[in-house]
Structure formats: C-alpha cells, structure tokens
Amino acid sequence: MRSVSDRAAVSATSCLRFSLLGLVLLAAVEAQAAGVLDQRAQLARWTWWDQRDWDWYERTSPFCESPDQRFDQTYYYRWELVNRHLVYASAADGYVVGEFLDRPHGDRPLGVSCAALGRQLAELRWARDRRYSEDFARWWSIPASCARGSSNWYAHAVWGLFQVSGERAFLRQMVPHLIRHYDGWMAERWDPQTSLFRCSGRDDGMDTNINSRQTGDPFAGATAYRPTLNSYLYGDLSALAAALSCLDDAAGAERFARAAAALRTQVQQALWDPQRRFFFPRSAFTEACTAVDADQTRTCTIPAGSLTHQAGRFAGSPHGRELIGYLPWQFHLPEPGRGFEAAWQGAADPTVFHAAYGLTTVERRDPLFRISDDSTDWSGNSHPALTSQVLTAMANVLHDYPQDVLTRAHYLTALTAYTQSHQRAGRPFIADTADPDRGTWLGHDTDHGDHHFNSTYVDLIISGLVGLRPRADEMLEINPLAPPEWSYWCLDEVVYHGHRLSILWDRDGSRYGRGSGLVVLVGGAVLAARVDLGRILVRLPERREQPRVQPLPSPEVNVAVNHGSSHHPRMTASHTVETERLHNLQDGRCWYQTSPHNRWTARGSTTREDWIALDLGTTRAITRVTLGLLDDGEGSEVRAPAAYELTYWNGYDWVVVPDQQRTPPVPCGGRANVITFPALQLRHLRLQLCHRPGSCSGLSEWEVWSPSSSPFLPPPATNANLALADAQRGLPRVTTSFTAAADRLDDVNDGRTPETPRSRDRWTARHSPNLRDWIAFDFGGDCQLGRVELHVWGDGGYIHAPRAITLERWDGRAWQAIPQTTHTPALPVANQLTTITFPPLICRHVRVVFTHALPAFAGVSEIAMWEQ
C-alpha cells in the first residue's frame, strides 16, 4: 500500500486553514436552510468549544438566543456536556449517558448513575434525535442496571419524554417496566405503618447533611421519611396513572391515581411543619446523638417520628430548613390553595437560601450551616443537582399554582445565579459542588469532577424561561418566564410532538422579521401570536411535519465498541503511550479535552506515520467509519493529522477502501470525521495516520458502523480461548508466584479487560520480593497452543510494563522456554495488547514469566491462549 506521506504536504497545508472560523465557513456552505436563527453563526459566537462537531449540534439540539450572553453560552455548553457524556453501550442497547467522565464506579463500567437519570432524561428529551433519550430510558429497564441503587423518579422522567415526543408506541413499551420498577420500591422502601417510603440521606446521594451529622453515622445518616424519595415516587405514581389513562387502561390508571392521592395526603400531614411552614425529613427510628453545651457533653435522643430540630441538640429551633423541602413542587405534590406556597418566601432571601452562585442546601440561619471543601457535604454548599430541581419546582409554582409569593423576577434571579456558577477560569464549566458565595468549585480533582452531568439547564431554559410546557394532549402551551424587559429572544428548531417549532419574542418585530410580540411558528408558518409576553394555548396542526433532521436509521450499529466483556473487537497500534490506553478508542465515548482525557496519541513516536488496526473478530458489512480526531490547538503537541488513509485486509494485503466520501474533506480535530462508502464485507480495518511536522496525531474514538436488520449481532466467530475460565470444569487451574494484596489472580482469565484505570479487574505483582514472577496454567490435559495474548496493565505509577515477557512449558521434569516466532510489540507496552506466536505445540502446563522493570512491578488484566 502506498504511504499517506505522498499527500501529506498538500493536506497539511489545507488542514492548517481549518481553524474554528474556517470550520464554520465550510460548514455554512454545507448546511441546510435554517429556521429563524443562523445556526452556524450561533455556534461561531463561542471560542471555548472542545466538541466542535457542528453537524451533531444541528442534528441534535434546538438553538437559542437571548440578550444575555451568560444564558446563551451556558445553554450551548450544556449541549456540549450532553455530547461528552454520551456512551455507546452496545449494538443491542444503543446509547447511555454517564455522570462522571472518568467512570469512577467499578461496578458500573458504563459510568451511569441511577441517581442522575431523572435529570439527564429531562435534558435529553429536548434532543431532536430521540435515539439518545429512548435508548437510555430503555437501558434502565434491564435488571443489571440497578435502577433503584439511589432514589430517583424513573417513571416520571419517562412520562416527561412522552410529553415532548408524543410517541405512544414507546410509552406502551415502557409502562410494564415502570410498574415493575415501582413495585420494587414498594418491596424495598415502603413502611406500611406510616404509609410512607423511607431512606437515608446517602440513599438520596446527599451525604453529610444537617440530619446525618446528628446521628452515629454523620456521612450516611439514619433512615427517615424524606421529602425526596416520597416526592419522587408520588411523581412516579402520577406519571403511571397518566400513562395508563393515555393507553386506555382505566382500571390501571385508577389504581395508581388512588395510590398517588394517598401518598400526597401522608406527605402533607407527616412532613409539613405548620409552625415553620416547610417540608422536613421525619425520623424513622429513635437515634442517639451527642450535644455539647457550656463545655459539657451530654447524650440526647432524636425520637422516631420527629421532624428536623424538633428534638436532639437543637430542639425547638425555628430553623432546620433544607432545600429538599421544595422538591414536592417539582412533582406538583402540594395541593394548591392550602397555603403550602408560603415555604417559598425563603427561596429569594439571602439570609435563607439565595446566593450569588446558586442556592445553599441549608438555610444560612441554621446552627449547622457550613460551607465545606468536601464535595459530599450537603450542609450549605451549592449542589447543581439540587439547585436545578428547585428551579424546576419554582417554575411549576409560577405556572400552575395561584399564589402571591413568587414572581418571574424571582425565577430570573435564581436562574441567573445558577448560570453564573457555570464558570471556571473564564470558560464554561460545571462540577459537583460549588461555594455559593464565591463561585469556586469545591472538593473535586480535575480527573474526576470536571464537567459533571447530574443537573439540568437546557430544560430550565426551554420549559421555564421560554415556557414551552410539555403536555400529553395535542395542545401547545407557551407561558414564558423571561423578563418583559428583554427586547428579544428565540428558541429555534425544537421538535415537539413531531412538529418543528420556533418560539420567539420580538418586541417591535425588527430582530427576526416574523412579526412583533410573542410568535409561535410551526414548520416555519405562524401558528399563534400575541403582542404581550403571556400565555398561549393553541391546538397543534393535525398533519405532523417530520423534523428537518432525521435520526440515523436504528438498525445501524457500531460494531467496533468493546466494553471489556469480550476478546473482540480489539485494536492494536504501531505505537502506544503507557498512560493513553488504546482501549479508549473503542469504549463508546468521544470527547476532545485534555483533562480528563479519553484518547490514544502517537506521542513519543519516532516515525512520520503510525497506524491503528481493528480486528472485528468476524466479517461484518461496513458502510461508515467515524474518527474522533484530536487537535489540542496551535503550538500543542497533539494536532490533527496532515492526512490519513483507511484500508482493509483483503486476505493478501492492505488496500484502500474504495469510493470514500469524507466529511470534512480534510482531517479536522475536535469533531467527528465521517467516512462513508459502499458496503464492504470485512473483518480487518487499518487507519494509517501521517503526522504534521513537529506534532503527532491522536484520536478519542473510532466507530465502525454496520447496517443490521437486528441489533443483536452474532458474536465474533473466533477459536476457543483455552485460557478462559470454565467454572463447571474448574479448568484451567491458575497459579502464581505472587499476587498483590489488592488484586485477584482469577481476574487474568475471566474474559474481561478493565475499561478504566480505577477498575480492579487485574493481577499485579506489586510489592513482590522477586525480580521475576509468573502465572501458570494447567489445562487438565494436553492441548495445542500457538499464540498467547496479554493485556498488559500499567497505571503510570507502581505498575509498569515488564522488561520482558517469556513463555515456558512443563516437559514433565522442568520448565522449558518456548521459542518465539513473533513478539508484538517487540517490547511490552502498558495498556496495549502483547501478542506472542510460536510453532504450534502440545502441552498441558504453560506459564507466563514477567521480568519486572524495578522499582515498578508488572501487571496484566487478561491472558488469552489460542491454538494458532
């Protein structure tokens, strides 16, 4: 195959022109006619983008404009946040959404969190490509998802998807799963004595709060009847009643409506304090606590059934309000007209909850209020997750409750403070916990807390500020909370019940040229308008116009993804850096920032070109390849390649994939580079990269798309892995000279490779007294071997690639070296597959010998052995 260097000089010159402005100009030529707003111009307003895939935003996100750039910038950043957190799970499951970018949970390898699902689905419901929200909603219905690991409002969130899409087929598919989910809550959390659900603050994801700090476990707290879970499940009950009614199941709807009404009554009676006019947690059991008064320590108790500060150290305190007391309104639980809305007097009060950068989790006057560097502290810090829930609740009060406590100005003030918190070092940003007064982010490290996705913002703009109120019927309701002082704003290209909507406010008609006042467009035509900023309620047209941008065909699946549960598909490369795992390219995630990174680069390579090869494990029909090329910017080490070539193995040689159509036509970093071609039946693909002079190339993800009539693709047809553990036979038997205390030997042949550095699925010899250590396999009988593959592990610290890996076989008397035919790569590289081949031999006992690169020690996550 000819080298891509032949075209590198011309391509490199072309690629240098593709700055952010160049990308926008090229894309503007390719873009289809927009709605009210110039979409590419909206994207070009900002220079902070990491994810510069304009095509994705046009396909996915509604566009927005206002007189306040703080709102606009944060709105588009939050769509970039969605883009970063999308994870392609599998051909069968499609997309899920992570909470933390680094996937910290070893038991949840996809990085998902049920504590975040309600907030994430609230954002995703506005994506024009429904595949993301519906895939993610369906994923939580499988038992392995552990959907009740933390409190959440799964059914209510799915009902919210339906209210935007209007797709009854999806709702009908989901309702049986949602009923089983609710029945699980009944079995696990229901207390028939009080007719309430009970959990701890830790179960809510709200550790170290003012109630837990008065118990024997200040972190997790004690079990209580909390406004959180009880409100969430009231929302689920109400959603199930509405869904079943929509699906013409009157009996089922009545059952859940009665349960919702009963739970509402109990919450209002048991958790509302009429003196303090607020909802509080109520203790489920009597708890002992410690009080310090006048330098004297005494033991006191918090009896079962007492609300916060009704007993214990601060008995009789008029304070004790936590922000969770507003959550009942998120689900319309409090009955209108009964005075509950008086609780909202503290929301805008700086001596209670209001702050410059969000809302405090506890009222400032409380004796236990504090702002802490600990991101798990809910005693005063501002948490975007809770702030966004309360803003949703506030919008509900303004839209749906007759009251004289809150005004539009209160909503704008709170939303502005929340918006201002989305900053760090002059760039849009969000983490888990903020200082509500200074706006600094607390208690997170850059590889864990950056760009945290467990809150809403897009939904607050669309359903709150713009006031598009989702409904199950065919009426369109618009009731903006935007300030009348603004002379213009626009929400453009939002898909609602199958219609393409634009909602705009243009006081004198000069901004958008579509008329003055509040105007609603459907498919570009005016559906309704009014001169002032008020409520519009109008029936949608009977004929549904299809969205301008359609989702990709659902049968198309990414066959390159591998989350470590199988040997294929797998990647190899001509060069790999130890701290940049090759597996990053097939983990279903694509983002382009430098920290935390998710990438492979050719840093340290001494050649002008490098390659990455993909073995699918079996022949697939391939029509499209997507490359997430990196470019860290002018003057950086990692730049988009000068050129690349996509080839496939035809059985004899690597040949160029014919008839390629590339978008964009030259390599560009920070966005998807899409290559389409007529369907090819192939198993092996190779990407050859020509580096720019003075820099190296890199990728975040390599997707390979196959059209399939069924998402359940047949597994790769490979020979049997002789090293794989067979639990029934107890073979092969594996022994070792040494295993680190924190690791397990049986991880080396469990068929899994770890996805993230935090995973413990590995063997290492850390702290071994030996220069060499070994792992031996006894197959229980003679078998033929010709190839051994090792997933070498390294963490950049105590665990490094060994100096050497050798193979030995037992001849009945002694261990004998196995002569190697190939060893790829020539020297072991951490976090890359090492393949050793040798003339086929018959043996029963084989061992792998590691020579440590002291003072570091060797590690391996998986060993596979094959006949040839």
Image (tube, helix red, strand yellow):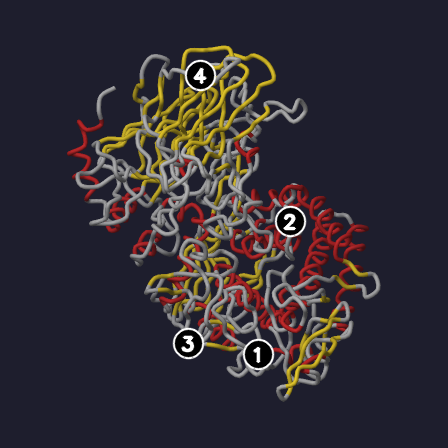
Residue 608 sits in which quadrant? top left
Mark 3: secondary structure: loop
Q: Is residue 623 above or below residue 308?
A: above
Q: Is residue 592 left or right of residue 689?
A: right
Earlier sequence position, callout 1 versus callout 3: 1
How far apart are the two marked residues, 4 and 2, measured between alpha carbons?
52 Å
Q: Is residue 633 left or right of residue 720?
A: left
- The disc placed on residue 363 is 1
Residue 200 sits in which quadrant? bottom right
Earlier sequence position, callout 3 versus callout 2: 2
Mark 1: secondary structure: loop
Q: Which amino acid type corresponds to the residue marked 3 in the rendered image?
A: Glu
How far apart are the two marked residues, 1 and 3, measured between alpha carbons?
31 Å
Residue at the disc numbered 3: 485
How far apart are the two marked residues, 3 and 4, measured between alpha carbons?
85 Å
Disc nearest the viewer among 3 and 2: 2
How far apart are the two marked residues, 1 and 2, measured between alpha carbons?
31 Å
Disc nearest the viewer among 1 and 4: 4
Say whether residue 563 is visible: no
Disc nearest the viewer among 3 and 4: 4
Which image quarter holds the N terminus? top left
Residue at the disc numbered 2: 147
Mark 4: secondary structure: strand
Q: Position of residue 61 (x, y in %)?
A: 44, 51
